[in-house]
Every structure is written in structure tokens, then in C-alpha cells.
Image: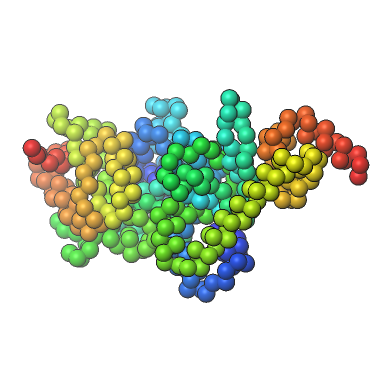
Amino acid sequence: MYDLFFQKLQEKVPLTDQEREQIKSYLTPKKLRKRQYLLQEGEVCKAIAFVEKGALREYSVENGSEHILQFAIEGWTISDLFSFLTGEQATYNIDALEDAELVLITRSAHEELLKAQPKYETYMRLLITGAYIALQRRLTSNISLPVEERYTSFTEMYPDIAQRVPQHMIASFMGVKPETLSRIRKKMADQK
Amino acid sequence: MQTIAIIGASGNMGAAISKSLSKGNYRLLLCAQGQDKVQAVVEEIKSGHPAADVKSIDCSLEASWEADIIVVAVPFAAEKEVAQKIQEVANQKIVISISNPLNDTYNGLVTAPDTSAAEELQKLLPNAKIVKAFNTTFAADFATPVIDGKQADAFIAGNDEDALQIASELVSTAGFNPIVAGDLSVSRTLENMQLLLIQLNMKYNYNWLAGWKILHQ
């Protein structure tokens, strides 16, 4: 239920059994079924979600079409951080692409843990800086790399995602038309 | 949309709460030992309200894992077993205690005066947000929350502000007037209030359709 969460945490910050139990007491285990929402635009994002099992996506809707900001598979974290930290309405939707098992950290649990456990604070700092760097890279690659290279780096970042997620969603994540992605994939397959 | 697991959904209170909450914008997971009986409750809800998001689920642990809010609608004597089953997945969740720890002859409570069924449940689920609610209303009141022209009050007690707020919304959805009575220790009073109401019901034949109403300016 919390195995992967603590495995990832302990990779960054080793914990004693007691510290692990203390952090665990603040966590909310939650199952989500395929197509269920964790967050809908206009609500307040109440929790950061860590994925123990399954796959989720975060997306916005502009002029009726979906734009995928992020996928989250095992070991990843997903939330609308702006809404979570400010209590303002979320601008993103988060839903499950597969049945999922999550570990949620609610706003109040987050605040209390930051005060109560310095190792949690360290982990969160590393997590959020990591997410910021990933975002910078995604932005850089989006504005500077050819689409083939972007697709390659995407499949490296999410190893088995292409088998788990429909192609039109990957196209949406990359900001290209599904036909474009299909052409690139064919071209890359021919080159192999 | 919040998901509510109702454990003991085939009982009188569990079924009444399930039917009432199906009127709100919630996803309901009904859970009880007799799957046939709980399925009958699901069918009844669906026949009256086809759009209701309600389903039966045979395992209290699975239902509670999926839920944001857990209603423990089992008798006080069965709470310990339920708590042991759901303990790990109830972490940080709102758990509603509805039970009244009556003795066999309905002339007293089995709990010591310095505790309550709700506080005992909190000890069993130390990381859950226990809220006392729906214990001062009879099962029949849910179908008729307005009695003799007056909307029955329903009292709520708990230690977590957000949880009290969410429980108040559930009580309103069910058609009662929610009154936050105080912290979880106020459950002692609330459970004794229902003891009195049960005794009065038997003495004066209210036909199990009676409730509390605070008169005030």
C-alpha cells in the first residue's frame, strides 16, 4: 500500500522505522478506478498524489480540446501544485487511465509533516526541485528539438507508456497532431 | 465527487443512510455481509433514482480503500471487528460513527461514563478523523426527516474542522438540520440522548418516528 512511496523516499532520505511510521500516519491510501477523476477543473486540489500502481494524466481543456501536461505512472507524483498550495481553483483535470492505487498527502497533512519531520521537508524540496528541472527540460525540448527527438526522450522518460496509453494522448502530450505522431513512429520503426 | 463507503448497508440504519445519501452528488459503495440484501438496497436506490452512482462491493477493506468517507453502520458490538479490517486504509479518512452502545434491555449504555462509542472507535482507528453523526435519528426518520411539520435536528461531534464540515453536508443531504455539538467527547451526551429517545419511544409509542429539535430564538 505504501511500499513504493517509502522506497522512493528512502532513496533520497534514509528513515528510521519510527520516522517511517510517523510519516505513514499522515498518509491517505486511495484507490481510483479507470476514468475516475482525482481532480476536476474548478475544484480545489486537496492532495498531492503518489502513484503506487496504475497510470494517471493531468490535462487542461482549451476550446474543447484536451492538452496533456503530465502522465504519472508507478513512482511518480501528480497534482495541481498551484491550487494545492494556494487553495485557489484548479485549472487542470487529473483522471485515471488505468485502475490506480495512490498515496495522497492532503494539504493539512503536508503542512503538519513539514513542521514535524525535517526529513519529509528535505524529500519534498528534492521532489519539487526535480519536478521543476523536468519542466524546464520539457519546455526546452518543446521549443528547440525536432519532434523525433522529443518522442525518443518521451519514451525514455516513461519507458512502457506507449503500450499503456492511447497514441492520441501521447500526441496531445507532445503538442502534435495524432497523424504526425503516427508518421514519426512509422519512420522510426523503418529506420530500425 | 466524493466516494462514500457504507459498511453495514443492508441493516436498517445502513440502508436508510444509503438511500438518503444517494440523493446527493456522491459515489456510494454499499458493503455488507449478505450480498443479496445489499444488492436489493442498490436495486431499490436505482429504481427510484436511475442516475445514482451506487454499487455493492463485498469487501469492507476494498470499499474503504476506495472511499474518501467511511460510514460504519454496524452495531457497537461489531465495530471492533470492522475497525480491525479497515484500519490501514482508513488512515486520515473521515469515519462516521453512528452507533449507540445500548445494553440488551435498552435501559443503559455498555460504555463507561468517561467514554463513548465514537471515542472507542477513535482508539481503534487512531489516524482516522472520527465524526459522530446520524446517531440521534431513527431509521424511519430518514424517509421522513420533517416530522409534525418540523425538520429534525441531527447532531455532529468531532475534533477535525474539515471533517465536521463534510459531515454537516452529508446530514443536510439526508434532509436533516445539522448542528455541530462539539468535539468528539460530546458523543457521550449524544449517545445518551438517543438512549432517552429510545426509552421515550417505547414508553409513549412514537412508532420509531421521532427526533430531536432544539427550540431557540
User: Percent x, y for residue B185?
Assistant: 22, 59
| The C terminus of chain B: image quadrant | top left
Q: Nearer the viewer, residue A53 or A143?
A: A143
User: Percent x, y for residue A109?
Assistant: 42, 57
Residue at 40% over, 54% down: A108
Q: Quadrant of residue B175?
A: top left
Residue at 70% over, 45% down: A140
Q: Nearer the viewer, residue A77 or B72?
A: A77
Residue at 46% over, 47% down: A84
Q: Is residue B51 left or right of residue A65?
A: left
| Above or below: residue B128 compared with residue A63 | below
Is residue A55 in view from this perspective?
no
| Above or below: residue B148 compared with residue A45 | above
| Above or below: residue B18 compared with residue B98 | above
User: Percent x, y for residue B187?
Assistant: 22, 55
Residue at 14% over, 40% down: B213
Is residue A84 in view from this perspective?
yes
Q: Is residue A53 left or right of residue B182?
A: right
Q: Nearer the viewer, residue B35 or A5?
A: A5
